[in-house]
Amino acid sequence: MDGRVIYHDRIRISDKALYRDDGVHLSDLGNDFWNNPFPVPHEWYQPGELIIGGVLSQSVYNFYEILYKEQPSKNVFDVSYMVPKFYQHVLTLAFAVKEVNENPNILPNITLGFHIYDSYYDARMTYRTTLDLLFKMKTFVPNYKCDTQKTLISTIGGLGHGTTFHMADTLGLYKIPQFAYGSFPPMESDARQLPSFYRMVPNEAHQFLGIIRLLKHFGWKWIGLIALNDNSGDHFLQTLEPLLSQNGICSAFTQIISIQPHFDNVDEMHDIALNMYVKIRDNKVTILIVYGESRAIISLRLIIFLPDPTNKENTSFKKVWIFTAQTDFISMGLLKVWNVLLFQGSLSFTIHSQNLPAFKAFLQSIKPSQSQGDGFIKGFWEQAFDCILPNFDVPLEDSDMCTGEERLQSLPRSLFEMSMTGHSYSIYNGVYVVAHALHNIHSRRSKQRGMGKSERLKLQDLEPWQLHTVLQDISFNNSAGETVSFTDQREVGGGFDIMNIVTFPNRSFLRLKIGWVDSDADDGKEFIINEDMILWHNDFNQGMPISVCNDYCHAGYQKKRKEGQKFCCYDCTPCPEGKISNQNDMAHCFRCPEDQYANKKKNGCIPKTINFLSYEEPLGISLASLALSFSLITTLVLATFIQHKDSPIVKANNRGLTYSLLITLIFCFLSSLLFIGHPGKMTCLLRQTTFGIIFSVAVSCVLAKTITVVAAFMATKPGSSMRKWMGKRLTNSVILSCSLVQVIICTGWLMTSPPFPALDMHSVMEETIVQCIEGSVTMFYCVLGYMGLLAIASFIVAFAARKLPDSFNEAKFITFSMLLFCSVWLSFVPTYLSNKGKSMVVVEIFSILSSSAGLLVCIFAPKCYIIILKPELNNREQLIRRRM
């Protein structure tokens, strides 16, 4: 049975569409049911050669349950509640058809008509009204067209997800184009199964993008989600919640609300409302996202009202409501007396729309007495203006009667808006899509007729399914100057507007456009928000609302997750040593750049001081002064020796070696200046090698002096062969050979791995050390080791010659100088390694100056003493006298 197909006179309908929930087929209900079906209170029919059907949603009825166990009663519904604002949808369809008929450039000589029904937000009534569109004129006979004057070419509807796809179940069988004007979840699988289905709204994905971008823009991370208990609500939660988690946002609660409140069990409803109210009232949750059809506002207000009925205004409800495009900001039925201040400062995603001056003029002309055939206006007029609409053919007798002269512009916006809403704009564009599609077909046929083809020109004979060939490629500019076209998924391109709702005590409000979202827009324009234009709820004192699980972690702290709670709830712990956080609510602390270090509060970085031994600091000035002073003293000693070059004491101690040693000591003192100042490439190359070579020459001179003393003593022995080595040959050989080895070591060092300047940013936290890297540490210690080897050799030779006769012997002084020299450089190595930065440089300069000064003092101080202070001892007799 489920797959049966019924055929009636060329019209095909699936048997499945005529089944009810209990499995009973409608063909078994009897002739009386079909000939006299239960009435549809609201419809508006305007005849035309081609009819555009409309299934809109304005009234809400409480329908009785039908079990199909007996003949159904015609009294299938109870009290109705009308949504006055949605009467604009009805008027928009009528206005668009009127505008097309009056436009000579679209469908000339063809009159469009319309047939509008109310779906009543009910699946059964949606099926019923859809079948009425297809088959009804005076009697209702499914699968038969009972009047050739009614040529249904397309339909517009519906507002909600349920209504839309209930219509599609039937319309898809006949391939009649259906243009949905409401916003609902993207159902790709359904769209593939419904090839006659078109959406006059953008893809829902743009709205999800907008919600995420909006929350991230304002830093809202702890939000509440409110959705209807239907398929669209489930889809919303299943899609949005993973996106929230991926973007660091948590839902504090997810509240499912009923589409239609039930009043049969007040106590149970009160308990449910109280439980929801506690969650919504949570002070930490400032942001509430509401998703669902417009009736969700009714349930939402009841949830807020029932636990505290005395506070009808709820003006102190400190929240930021974010409404999706499905939820229109409405006031209806018994709730219209409530104030709208509850939603002050709310943000709303709306279908993009433009104001049309002609539409506003059309609304201003609406009067009950001039709206023939409009089955919607009576209920709207009476509910909106709170009066009774009389029969205008008889005089008014009751003060509660409507005059019929009331104006729509006098109504508060919560009841009716004079500017075209997003849903109305979609309906308006839907009518024009049909009109332009028909016009394109008409133009194509006219062109074929002009070419001699015999195809008839009558659009009245056009089958609805034939529109699909042109609809996918349709593109035109509407009267607002905007381009209307479909994407590959048969939905209108574009995005959503973001509105700020500003409310007033007289139950009116304004929508301020503060931005938009469109993921298909150019880079940088996918999401635009003008924060300065937003007017928040008064309780926020116009400051930006904050919605987080706990207070922000301030700079200098990092987040630490609380066990067993959502990741948006966390503790704050100080940053570890050496790391900072310079913004609120940072997940992890981080290290400063290498040239900076963390301050004490760990919330910022301080530039490191450049550390090197400078001529401008006291220590640098002192060491440089000391080096220059010693070099000057050495120069004076040299001048003294040159002045007294012919004196016995100068001659007796090898005058040439003395001059060489003194000159070398001058360079030794001056070499320390290479270690002061900003290290450069040349100073790093010359620093250690110059010091090593000069000191090797100095120690070689000392060694030559010592060897000369020993050789001179040995040469005095009868028959000694040492006499031929005496003189400059021996000293020059010792100095050149010993110095040459050091030169070779230094040359190899510079050729293989030379020293270079570098920045050390890690040794000292607060400093950037500018230093010379030795390049090869091995070569550096080879230089020091060889210099130490020469010093030890000098010490051994001098120590062995210390008991030679005093008149020829300065070995004792050389012994002390070498002992001091070795002591200095032996202590230098561990001290050098244990220091950082300029302290290392200071240690090396001190070692250079102290060891050089030791040589100067120990070797030359006694001689200067005799030359300057005891000249009487500076004679040949004193020098040749031997002490016993």
Image (cartoon, rainbow, N blue to C red):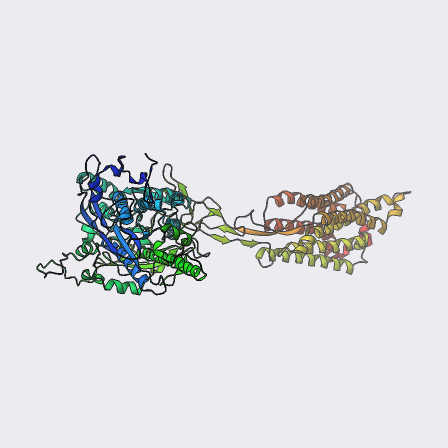
Residue 500 horizontal side relative to residue 686, left or right? left
Residue 278 in percent (x, y) is at: 25, 43
Residue 162 coordinates in the image, percent (x, y): 30, 45
Query: Which image quarter holds the C terminus?
Result: top right
Q: Quadrant of residue 434?
A: bottom left
**Farthest residue in the left direction?**
397
Tell me what residue is drawn at x 69 percent, y 54 percent: 671
Location of residue 437 in the rendering, given as x and y in whole percent from the top left corner: 38, 56
Q: Residue furthest right?
A: 719
Q: Nearer the viewer, residue 866 or 532?
A: 532
Identify which residue is drawn at 54% across, 48% down.
764
**Screen quadrant of the N terminus:** top left
**How many tags in the picture?**
0
Q: Nearer the viewer, residue 120 or 28?
A: 28
User: Foreground: 310 or 585?
Assistant: 310
Depicted 356 relative to depicted 312: above or below? below
Question: In which image quadrant can residue 558 be found?
Answer: top left
Whether residue 160 appears in this view of the structure is yes
Q: From what the image shows, is residue 699 above or below residue 15?
A: below
Across and down, in percent, residue 132 comes to 26, 48
Residue 705 shows in this picture: no
Nearest to the observer: residue 459 or residue 481:
459
Q: On the rendered structure, is 722 left or right of 835?
A: right
